């Protein structure tokens, strides 16, 4: 009871803090945008056109970002009712994660056989050998093409084409019909999200529910699909990849609100570079305390998941079934990040 009594005022304080923090930062939103956001293409006419087909090369950082930029811009109108300046757009989580992958070196060629993505060579190149880049393809190309398909981007389905990577071309899809054919469930899940987005009575929580359903559907089986990439990384980085994928399932169950300010802050807790075998959290000297704590927390979470044979995830899903529980969880995360920053 004492703990509960202490907890309530704590939550209230956190609420007040977060509210003031959000207000204070509302005018500096562009500072929170992912790297090179401003200079990335933001409309279809910024891309190459051939025979009335827009051609996007998702293996170049700004062009993949451009898909997100169009998506964020074209969906802004549906989030106006939740707050100003598109800050409440829950699609922000995607470009911010992608930006984090880029700035931490995770989109570069991990085999170092080419200079793709490396500062000394072609820094904007996205390597098909990067595990992160491949998995992110299904969280960029698919949501984008499904948005084209659902009509909210204002171009028709046969007017957009993505370019293939230099190898493993059969692992990806490049247009609406091709992606629908190869990944029907994933595309359907995104289509459901866009359908719900367009309904005038959409609620914030149900939008999150649909978004996370699409997100987890996009990720399903993808880690394993590209597991041959693991050979390029340290054992610790591979563990982190797997652990992060699992953690995303816990976040999904909580309907974690992937809005601009919140994701930006939360990402400051993620590893700022690729992990090497000598990295032992919480003792990584070039990481911030928050980054060390988050990495340790992931370890504990994933160990519990392993020990219980994922029963913990089932229990967590049941626990997160009520809006109140989800709310308390998000307040706690917010509060934690606020205190640690
Ligand atoms: C879409 O891509 C598939 C292969 O991924 C191809 O066979 C098909 O012709 C493409 N469709 C259009 C309309 O470009
Ligand atoms: C990942 O989770 C496992 C438990 O499943 C844990 O033993 C390992 O230390 C974690 N590694 C990282 C880098 O988070």
Image: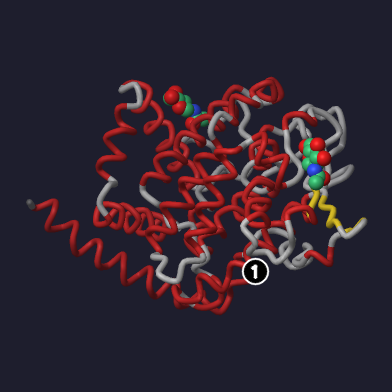
**Figure check: 77 above or below 167:** below
- Is 304 on the left or on the right of 341, as rendered? left
- Is 80 on the left or on the right of 6, as rendered? right
Q: Percent position (x, y) of residue 153?
A: 68, 64
Quarter where residue 95 is shown: bottom right
Q: Nearer the viewer, residue 149 or 217?
A: 149
Q: Is residue 44 visible to us here?
A: yes
**Figure check: 113 above or below 118:** above
Q: Is residue 117 visible to us here?
A: no
Circle 1 crowding by C-alpha within 10 Å: few under 14, some 14–19, many from 20: some
Q: Residue at x 44, y 59 (%)?
A: 207
Label 1 C-beta lies within 8 Å of the nearest ligand 1 atom: no
Q: Percent position (x, y) of residue 129?
A: 76, 30
Q: Percent position (x, y) of residue 239?
A: 54, 26
The coloring applied to the image is secondary structure
- Is 308 on the left or on the right of 263, as rendered? left
Q: Residue at x 63, y 25 (%)?
A: 225
Q: Quadrant of ligand 1?
A: top right
Q: Nearer the viewer, residue 26 or 203?
A: 203
Q: Nearer the viewer, residue 195 or 240?
A: 195
Q: Percent position (x, y) of residue 156?
A: 74, 59
Q: Nearer the viewer, residue 218 or 89?
A: 218
Q: Residue at x 59, y 22 (%)?
A: 235
**Figure check: 237 above or below 264:** above
Q: Which residue is mark 1?
A: 73
Quarter where residue 200 is shown: bottom left
Q: How many marks?
A: 1
- The local secondary structure at tag 1 comes to helix
């Amino acid at each position: 009871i004492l703990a509960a009594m202490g907890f309530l005022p704590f939550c209230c304080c956190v609420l007040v803090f977060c509210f003031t923090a959000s207000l204070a930062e509302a005018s500096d939103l562009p500072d929170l945008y992912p790297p090179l956001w401003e200079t990335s293409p933001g409309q279809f006419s910024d891309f190459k056109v051939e025979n009335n087909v827009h051609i996007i090369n998702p293996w170049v950082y700004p062009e993949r970002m451009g898909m997100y930029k169009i998506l964020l811009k074209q969906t802004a109108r549906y989030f106006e009712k939740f707050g100003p300046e598109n800050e409440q757009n829950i699609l922000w989580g995607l470009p911010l994660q992608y930006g984090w992958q880029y700035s931490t070196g995770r989109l570069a060629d991990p085999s170092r056989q080419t200079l793709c993505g490396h500062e000394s060579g072609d820094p904007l190149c996205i390597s098909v050998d990067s595990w992160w880049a491949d998995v992110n393809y299904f969280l960029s190309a698919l949501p984008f093409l499904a948005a084209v398909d659902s009509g909210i981007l204002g171009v028709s389905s046969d007017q957009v084409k993505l370019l293939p990577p230099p190898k493993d071309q059969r692992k990806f899809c490049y247009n609406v019909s091709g992606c629908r054919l190869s990944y029907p469930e994933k595309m359907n899940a995104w289509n459901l999200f866009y359908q719900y987005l367009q309904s005038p009575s959409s609620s914030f929580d149900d939008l999150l529910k649909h978004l996370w359903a699409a997100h987890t559907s996009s990720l399903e089986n993808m880690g394993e699909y590209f597991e041959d990439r693991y050979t390029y990384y340290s054992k610790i980085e591979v563990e982190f990849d797997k652990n992060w994928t699992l953690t995303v399932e816990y976040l999904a169950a909580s309907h974690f609100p992937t809005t601009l300010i919140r994701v930006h802050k939360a990402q400051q807790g993620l590893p700022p570079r690729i992990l090497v075998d000598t990295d032992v959290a919480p003792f990584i000297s070039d990481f911030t305390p928050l980054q060390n704590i988050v990495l340790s927390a992931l370890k504990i979470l994933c160990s519990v998941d392993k020990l219980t044979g994922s029963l913990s995830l089932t229990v967590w899903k049941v626990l997160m079934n009520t809006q109140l529980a989800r709310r308390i969880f998000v307040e706690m995360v917010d509060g934690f990040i606020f205190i640690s920053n």
